Amino acid sequence: MREFHRATGWHIDADRRVLRVDWEDGAATEYGFEELRRACPCAMCAGEGGFRGTMSAATPLSDKQTTLESVQPVGRYGLAPLWGDGHSTGIYTFKMLRTRAGLSP
């Protein structure tokens, strides 16, 4: 039994500033660049081990920080975006992305 759905493709729509993800079950989801950056799960942004991260709903973000340059797959379980400011350490799992979109993992 599979634990989660996998993405079958993704597309950066720079004009609309959204990342579109297509899923193996036929669903398609879109994530705004700023929403996606604020949800960065890396240790620096989200925090870890009792240490608070640097990202919150009130954190001011520059255009570079919210410009999605590229997205690379990470194994068979997630995507790693490269942001305009060079930030690239967040791994957005497929489970996390589907949950954020209100879909079953």
Image: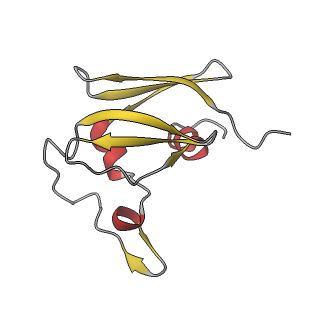
Indicate whether 19 appears above or below 41: above
| Outermost residue to the bottom | 50
Q: Is residue 84 above or below residue 18?
A: below
Residue drawn at point x = 60 percent, y = 42 percent:
75
Which quadrant holds the N terminus? top right
Residue 101 placement (x, y as % from top left): 51, 36
Left or right: 3 in relation to 56? right
- Percent x, y for residue 56? 29, 62
Q: Quadrant of residue 94?
A: top right
Q: Residue at x 24, y 48 (%)?
A: 86
Along the viewing direction, whichever of 1 and 74 lies nearer the viewer: 74
- Location of the C terminus by quadrant is top right
Name the residue furthest right.
1
User: What colouring does the structure picture have?
Assistant: secondary structure
Q: Position of residue 11 (x, y in %)?
A: 41, 22
Point out residue 40 in the picture as x, y percentages from the top left corner: 39, 53
- Compared with residue 91, is residue 82 higher up or lower down, i.e. above or below? above
Is residue 82 found left or right of 77 in the rendered image?
left
Q: Residue at x 35, y 66 (%)?
A: 44
Question: Residue 79 versus residue 100: which sits nearer the camera?
Answer: 79
Image side of residue 87 versus residue 40, left or right = left
The quarter of the picture where residue 74 lies is top right
* Number of numbered labels in the structure image: 0
Residue 98 image-quadrant placement: top right
